[in-house]
Image (cartoon, rainbow, N blue to C red):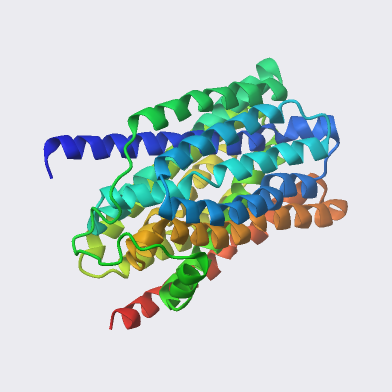
Amino acid sequence: MNAETCSYRRYVLFILTLVYVFNFVDRQILVILQEPIKAELGLSDTQLGLLTGFAFALFYVVVGIPIARWADVGNRRNIVSLALVVWSGMTAVSGLAQNYVQLLLARIGVGVGEAGASPPSHSIISDYYAPEERGTAMSIYNMGLYIGILVGLLLGGWLSDKLGWRMAFFAVGVPGVLMAVVVRLTLKEPARGGADMVSDPSVGEKYTFKQTLSYLWKSKAFRYASFAAGFCSFAGYSTLTFIPSFLIRSHGMSVSQVGVALGLIIGISGMIGALTGGYLADKFGKKDMRWYLWVPGIGVLLSLPFSLLALNLDSLNTVLVCIFISNVFMSSYLGPTIAIAHHLVKPSMRAMTSAILFFILNIVGLGCGPMVTGMVSDYLAPEYGVESLRYALIFSSFAVLIAAFKYIRSGSALLKQAD
């Protein structure tokens, strides 16, 4: 591979990662704004959980399937650019909401737009990076998630204090439209399967959703890994959604203080964990592909004790340190999981594979995690008051035990599948 090609593929990865930053800025800003929104619109924790979780996730994953099908046969660059315009515009519209239903509809619009981001991007990245590089490349891409959280929390908290929650939505939504122009004008559509070492005669073939789903369902390794990622996401999204409110209610922090503290903690620790997870999976996976499953399994298991400490200690500084350490381990799972999923399928199935993986991940995690946590918090509120959220988050943290078990099962299935 010549220097120009290497330079350009790094540029593509940078731009797609930046798009993912916009994705999570627009998604995560609602989390830091939910306390003032709750106060103005009179919402419950269950409604907040639905707003940031199930309602968003349902449309995100359902619309993601036909978009991924489109991406497997059409121009992926154009899809990413169009999706960016849609979700950025709907983020800005969120600032106009006058009641819960209007805000819910706006966030559904964000979910529909964001459904067109990751599956086409994953497919593009796999066509620029060889199998032994994909864990790192996918993890670099997924660093955009944590950079987006960092920017969303920092910027959202500051904008909320200075301009109010409505203007915060406008301020983060509009720049995404400009970024869409950059994607459309500077990225090239790569040849499918171009980075794979072995020529695949299936390249160029078109597979239906049913064919891809059937192909994946026959792979126990994929089934176990996808549900493992789902339970990681259950714990992760529960924390991302409600840890700001927990710090405000149980530790007396202000919205802007939480924005700065969590933005730096989640953003930096997430980038460290994502990059380390991908690097370790690629390093050890060269000799044994099961490391693409063992690295995330070990990582999320190690996150649990620090999550429990963060939710039970009284010292705010110690709590924040524990959140940082927990998130380093927790952030290791997604890049290796996507990489192994793409390894298991044909090049022309990759966007759909990502969409199916994200369907499971987001229904179990984003859809159920915040909603269940909010419901548990509301159920415990009459007895525990503001501390009900603490116990709801403790309950959700134990989902990583199921995730670790399923990653182990997936590794065993992968070995049998290889034989």
> What percent of the width, then of the height, locates residue 223?
48, 72
Q: In the rendered picture of this protein, how many numbered marks are placed on residues?
A: 0
Q: Residue at x 39, y 38 (%)?
A: 16
Q: Is residue 200 above or below residue 23?
A: below
Furthest-top residue in this view: 162
**Residue 29 or residue 124, whichever sits in front:** 124
Q: Residue at x 31, y 37 (%)?
A: 188
**Residue 308 or residue 50, whichever sits in front:** 50
Can see residue 171? yes
**Residue 281 or residue 202, whichever sits in front:** 202
Q: Is residue 321 above or below residue 57?
A: above
Q: In the figure, is residue 27 to the left or right of 302?
A: right
> What percent of the width, then of the height, locates residue 28?
59, 38
Q: Is residue 44 above or below residue 151?
A: below
**Residue 371 or residue 63, whichever sits in front:** 63
Quarter of the figure that contains the C terminus: bottom left
Q: In the figure, is residue 339 to the left or right of 24?
A: left
Q: Is residue 96 above or below residue 351?
A: above
> What percent of the width, then of the height, locates residue 127?
29, 51
Quarter of the figure that contains the N terminus: top left
Can see residue 147? no
Q: In the figure, is residue 201 to the left or right of 253?
A: left
